[in-house]
Image (spheres, helix red, strand yellow):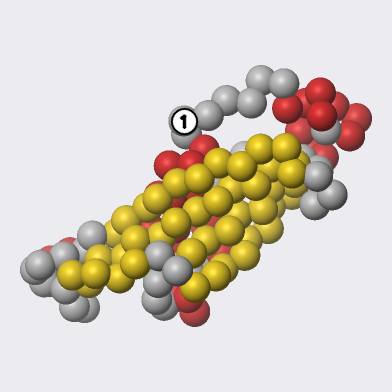
Amino acid sequence: MKKIIFIETGVGIDTHGQDVTKASIRAVENAIHYNSMPGIKDYLPDQSLHNMKVNIVLAVPADKDQLNVNKVKNEIPYGEVTVDIVDGGLATTSGIVLEEQADKNDLMYVVNAAVQVGY
């Protein structure tokens, strides 16, 4: 990305099930669903949303190898999407193991996202 125009941040949590993909999707949703970029086309080459680049940075606490990057990318409706995964986030106790929620242990995963938009 040559130029970053906008950065949105969010947090996503999977309280039960230890699903890092679910927490990551929720973090991206949290970042993008409270913003509007009505003038974004004015800054993009050829004033086209197809020329927008979006880089998602995810701070993931565990199970990075189980993260389904394509599912996370699908949360972005326009442009060329890339994903960077970094150490971070939080794995902390939920206080209970619920087998019916697919818990493997008592951890909940908290993922932080930064969604960078530009060209």
Q: Quadrant of residue 4?
A: top right
Residue projecting furthest to the right: 46
| Residue 70 position in % (x across, y down) | 58, 60
**Could you tell me which residue is drawn at 81 percent across and 44 percent down?**
3
Q: What residue type is disc 1 on?
A: Tyr
| Residue 46 position in % (x across, y down) | 90, 30
Position of 106 relative to 4 (above/below): below
Q: Secondary structure at mark 1?
A: loop
Position of 107 relative to 10 (above/below): below
**Could you tell me which residue is drawn at 66 percent across and 20 percent down?**
38
**Could you tell me which residue is drawn at 59 percent across and 48 percent down?**
115
Q: What crowding class fits label 1: few (fewer than 14 Cα within 10 Å), some (14-19), or many (20 or more)?
A: few
Q: Quadrant of residue 15?
A: bottom left
Camera-side residue of 108 and 102: 108
Camera-side residue of 117 and 63: 117
Read off the residue under disc 1: 34
